[in-house]
Amino acid sequence: MGSPFSFAKNSILFLEYYVIIKATDIVKTAAPQLKHYNIILRLKTIRGDIGLKGSSRLIFLILLILVGCGGLETKTIPDFYEKNLGDISQITIFDGNTGYEKVVTDKSVIEDFLRNIEGIKFIPDENQEARDGFNYSITFFEGAKETFQFSLTKVGEHYYHTEPNSHPIVDDFYESLDRKGE
């Protein structure tokens, strides 16, 4: 059996590794677009050089910076879309409730739809747990190349609610189009 000092040291090391693992999970969830969470794992390998007290402070500081700077923010479609919206040549809208898909290639109809949705704010949901199903999935194309895909509540791996509510806007637009796949 080890000394009380040895037990305390091992308990602190276990706690430190647990905090590193949990912190990494938090950063992956809160800011997956940042790949810098690997810094936290690297700290584990240099812990001996920094010392336990310094290492704990450094881990906390890095976590604070990563989570604070890497949090999700409210965005609009032009913020998400990294290209020129004017270059979109096709929009496909898939109805998750019926399984039908509608394709739009008319440039004036595309521009009208983009004008209707470009001001919608996508506000990050507090709860980022995975969900099943969607009402509509919208895909943008430039030529034959798919350039962006999102649903009314999910962009990339993140969940959002919208202001104003995007469902009636997309639903009205979808219903105004001829169905493909019927």
Image (tube, helix red, strand yellow):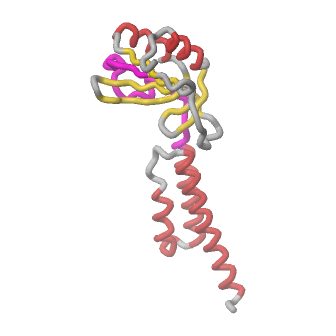
Q: Residue furthest left?
A: 143
| Residue 176 location (% of width, % of height) | 49, 8
Which picture quadrant has residue 22?
bottom right
Q: Residue at x 50, y 75 (%)?
A: 48
Left-right relation of 175 to 3: left
Tell me: residue 112, above or below residue 151.
above
Asked if residue 77 is among those painted magenta in the image, a careful observer would answer: yes
Query: How many numbered marks have been drawn onto this rendered protein structure?
Result: 0
Judging depth in this view, the residue of 88 and 74 nearest the camera is: 88
Tell me: residue 122, above or below residue 67.
above
Quadrant that contains the N terminus: bottom right
Residue 122 visible here: no
Q: Residue at x 55, y 67 (%)?
A: 55
Q: Residue furthest bottom?
A: 1
Asked if residue 67 is among those painted magenta in the image, a careful observer would answer: no
Judging depth in this view, the residue of 114 and 93 nearest the camera is: 93
Which picture quadrant has residue 147?
top left
Tell me: residue 43, above or below residue 158.
below
Query: Which residues are the magenta region?
Result: 69-92
Q: Residue at x 45, y 52 (%)?
A: 36
Residue 98 visible here: yes
Left-right relation of 108 to 40: left
Q: Residue at x 68, y 82 (%)?
A: 7
| Residue 98 location (% of width, % of height) | 54, 24
| Residue 83 location (% of width, % of height) | 34, 26
Q: Residue furthest front?
A: 182
Left-right relation of 101 to 65: left
| Residue 20 location (% of width, % of height) | 57, 62
